[in-house]
Amino acid sequence: MSLGLFQRATARELWQLVLPHQKADKAVRQALVDLEAAGRVREELRLPDGRKLWCLTSSGRREAIGLLPAGTRISALRPVKDGRPAAYSEHALDVAATAGLLARAGIGHLEAFTTEVEHAVPRRRSLFTDLVLRDPGADVPLLLVEADRDNESAGELAEKLTGYRAWCELPAKGALKAKFADSLRARGARTHELRLWRARYLATGREGLPAVALVLVPGRKRQRPGAKPSTEEEKREQARRVHERLMARGRHVEATTEALWSPLPYWGDGTTARDYHRALPVVATTLPLLRARGADAAVWRRFGRPGWHTLHHALDNPDGDQLLTAQRAAADQARREQQEAEHEAARPAPAAPRSSPTSGGRRKRALGGTTGCAPPAARPRPTRRRRRPPSASGPPPKPNAPAPGGAGPDRSAAFRRGVPTRPGGSGDGAKAHR
């Protein structure tokens, strides 16, 4: 099945695609031997490093067609002529190696890859993508991979990126109607729903168009017959020069295609967010880096950003819509606070209430102010005495008190009230007896 997707591969590439969690390719090599005995695969030739290059036979290809999903592109057969080994495509082997390294890092799997996918653009040469990754729900759900060798110039690689941008800008069927004309020219994610690429692929989960990954591959330099083998130090120095040459190639392509991947600034004072909805995300790495460190390591460079990143973080846009939402929320909050402060400053001061002399003094006493008098709680409350009627001879004697001269109690009050002094007698009789 894996050889049905990729034209040719060695046991190392098939091991990374089929059994990425195995520590070695021994099980895959044994399976290839069994398939060769059954007539499903055959050894095409041996590589300079001694590895066997395998491809499908006619019966193996028919069986692979039944196993793969409908519409999957199946590799073509190249029969042996006159018993001579067929020439193989080094580029096809690099594509299989890239897919295996991605799968080994957990980025995609065997069924998620498709090779040689055509993206036709009117009035332009058809663009065939080397490898397309479609893995819905993953961190990287969509990725268009171009395995570039040194046999193409940097200008030809930049032309490929221009073709990708032109294909992503194609409108979908029916989107050229008058009611969609303004929407196609608008900014934002809503324009993607009217594009051809959204009718073919699922959403990427990020702002912008489908991401393009450039895997730069050094040209295979063959040693001359009888040449002295290189030492380890010479191999390291050669690898360093190759890496610098590939990085210079990537920087040249980045500077040439700035108009394709550069985002536009959003409007608004104090807004530093960028609009990635019409930008083509481009990430680049080298095949030696993928082999040395793994596709999940920080071996990817995003065009327009410094430094090395993992593939997931390289495709993210931290200065895009997320930053725009935060900056607009902060600006709205600052604007509301300023309006509240201006409204509070424009309010008239409250007028002081008018007070009468009496009420003013009462208010001061209630508030503990000084009015020349002690507070009400500090003044003793005066006791009220009962008033008695005044008498001519001075204060009235106490009741039942002896009269002056020892004559006994004064009974004038009793006579005045008409009360007898003795029981059975009258007042006049008592007076006459004395």
Image (cartoon, rainbow, N blue to C red):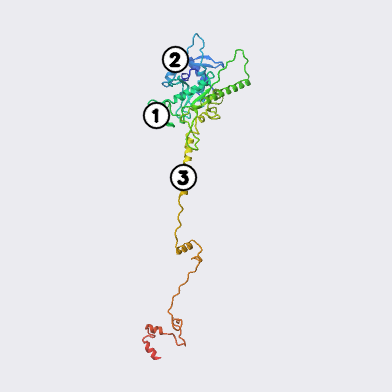
Q: Which label is found at residue 348? A: none
Q: Is residue 146 above or below residue 401?
A: above
Whether residue 431 sits left or right of residue 156 in the image: it is: left
Tell which of 218 and 69 is nearer to you: 218
Q: Position of residue 69 (x, y in %)?
A: 42, 22
Q: Position of residue 366 (x, y in %)?
A: 47, 62
Residue at the spot of label 2: 59
Q: CA distance from mark 3 to mark 2?
A: 79 Å
Q: Amino acid at mark 1?
A: Ala
**Secondary structure under the numbered disc 1 in the rendered image:** helix
Q: Which label is found at residue 339? A: 3
Q: Amino acid at mark 2?
A: Ser
Residue at the spot of label 1: 181
* Crowd tier of the residue under label 3, counting other residues whose Cα lies within 10 Å: few below 14, some 14–19, many 20 or above: few
Q: Earlier in the sequence, mark 3 or mark 1?
A: 1
**Secondary structure under the numbered disc 3 in the rendered image:** helix
Tell which of 89 and 283 is nearer to you: 283
Q: Is residue 356 above or below residue 314?
A: below
- The answer to which image quadrant residue 60 occupies is top left
Q: Amino acid at mark 3?
A: Gln
Q: CA distance from mark 1 to mark 2?
A: 52 Å
Q: Earlier in the sequence, mark 3 or mark 2?
A: 2
Q: CA distance from mark 3 to mark 1?
A: 39 Å
Q: Nearer the viewer, mark 1 or mark 2?
A: 1
Q: Position of residue 383 (x, y in %)?
A: 47, 72
Q: Are marks 3 and 1 in contact (CB under 8 Å)?
A: no
